[in-house]
Structure formats: C-alpha cells, structure tokens
Image (tube, rainbow, N blue to C red):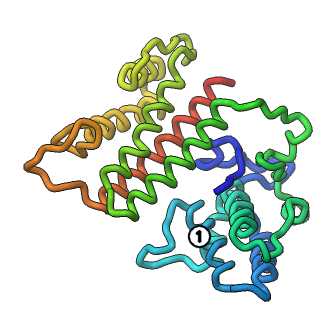
Amino acid sequence: MQHLIFDLSWRVKPPADGTFRNATVPQAAVEEFAALITRVAEGHAEAEVQKTYQNEFARALGTRVVHFAPLTLKGAMYEAARNAPLFIDAFYSACLELKTNKSAVQIPTVETINAILDEFGSGYLVQPPNLVLREEAVLVQVPTISLLERAHEEFLGAVSRSQELLEGGKPREAVQEILWLLESVATAFSGISVGATVVRGKYFNEIVKDIRHAKPSSTLDTALKWLMAFHGYLSSPTGGGVRHGRSLDLDTLLPHEAEFFCNLTRSYISYLLSEYQALRK
C-alpha cells in the first residue's frame, strides 16, 4: 500500500489554519469527495469499491472495520476529516489500491484531488509521493530521504505488520513488531541538543533519562515518565513479557491487551517524532 509522505507530527496534530484551512476538511469538501467515490463506483462492483475507501478511512483513524460497531463509509470520512492530512492520505491511498487491484476502475487523478482541495480552501497539495502545505509548496525541497521520511515509511509498515499479526491471532508478536520501532525512534535523539543539554545516551533508557533531565517539569518530561513505566512493564517477564519472555505461570497476552499496547505505542511514536522535529528546528 502506497501512502503519501508528510510530516509525521501531522498525524497527531495538523498545522493550524492560516491563509488556508489546514487543520480539518470542511463538510462541503467531504461531501464532494463522497460524491466522487460514488461516481468511481458506478458501473463496477460498487460495494467492493466503497469498501476499499471505507477501509482506508478506518485505518487512518487507527480502527478496524471489523470492530463491533463499524463505521459507515460516510461516518469514517467525517471522523477522518477532523485531521486533514489523514483524510487526504486515506483518499489517495484508496485510489492507488483500486488502480492496482481494479484496473478497470477509473480513479480520480491527482489534478482532480488538488482541484477539490483548492476549491474548498484546503492548505494542502498532493505532489506524489508527498503531501505538502500549499503555503510552502514553492519552497519545498524534498531530500533524497530524511529521518522523518524513513520513520514515516517504517511507521506505516510496522503498523500494518502488527495489525496483520493481531488479526492472525499472534498478539505478543504484534506488540513486538511495533515496540522495536519505538525504541529505534528514541535513538534519533542521541547527540541532539535539548535546551542547553546534549543528549549523550546511546540506548533507550539512557536517552529518555537525558531528555527528562534537560526538560524537567514539562509535558515531554511527564510523557517520558509514563513511557518509561510503559516500556518497563512490557519488558518485564511479570508484565507484558514482550521483550524478555513471560513467566510461565502467567496467562498469555490477550488480544485486547495487545491491541491496547499497539495503539499506545503508535501514539508514543507519533509524539516523539513531533518533539524530534521541534527540537531540530
């Protein structure tokens, strides 16, 4: 599955509105995209085409369509519209999936997507493989590959693999798949300046302690305190038992516990990458 590349911090909090509307997708635009999906589905396996879009919008929300109360396509679109980059990425990714698997379906072009975004004052441009802010589009110089791009790709890959493992009845492996990425992202802070302090640690616990020491009594400090407790629990044989094995006298990790751990880990990854970007500016 090909997704757009954009600042991973936007998955947590999109840029604020400015000259254009950056944070959300307005209702009129959601309706226009929904009407476009209807036109795409006409004359084909309509339910299957709509399901493709529904799955992508549900995935953008971090939910699965197989949940007890699945969202309708329109419901998933309106929920995703609370975060404009996630909405645009979901629509674009569904189009590419249809192009790959349903070659007879005539999907919207990038020009069509951008025209709708422009019509409703959205602050984004789709410039495959990137999603860029319209205000900065002329200035954007896309590097060959950056840490954020690599993290974006690794993030999506790990999320997809962990979800497959969850659905395949392998909860422990699912958590392991996403946890290693959290630990890898933390190492990106090694060597950077946090205030007047340079992070000297090389390993997860050392790095976290250095950052907390550099920014005491901050949101970052509190979040990292929770993260260390969370990571320690998952590592412990008497806790999650994900990294160092699990005591044999304990029950195995339950699916709903694993899903909770996976979702929480994804949130921490997004938050850390947002902080990393802020510190690098």
Hey, which residue is sitting farthest left in the picture?
A: 249
Amino acid under disc 1:
Asn
Q: Is residue 203 visible?
A: yes
User: Is the residue 66 above or below the residue 11 in the image?
Assistant: below
Quarter of the picture containing the N terminus is bottom right
Tell which of 97 and 116 is nearer to you: 97
Rendering coords of residue 235 (x, y %): 27, 37
> Quadrant of residue 110 in the image?
bottom right
Residue at x-position 65% and y-position 23%: 280
Residue at x-position 81% and y-position 82%: 39
User: Is the residue 141 above or below the residue 18 in the image?
Assistant: above
Quarter of the picture containing the C terminus is top right
User: Is the residue 274 above or below the residue 36 in the image?
Assistant: above
Residue at x-position 32% and y-position 40%: 230
Direction from residue 281 to residue 162 in the image, left or right: left
Q: Secondary structure at mark 1?
A: helix
Rendering coords of residue 93 (x, y %): 70, 60
Rendering coords of residue 216 (x, y %): 43, 23
Direction from residue 258 to residue 267 in the image, left or right: right
Determine crowd level at label 1: few under 14, some 14-19, many 20+ residues with C-alpha closer than 10 A.
many
> Quadrant of residue 48 in the image?
bottom right
User: Is the residue 278 above or below the residue 36 in the image?
Assistant: above
Q: Is residue 28 visible?
A: no
- Give the residue at mark 1: 55
Tell which of 171 and 99 is nearer to you: 99
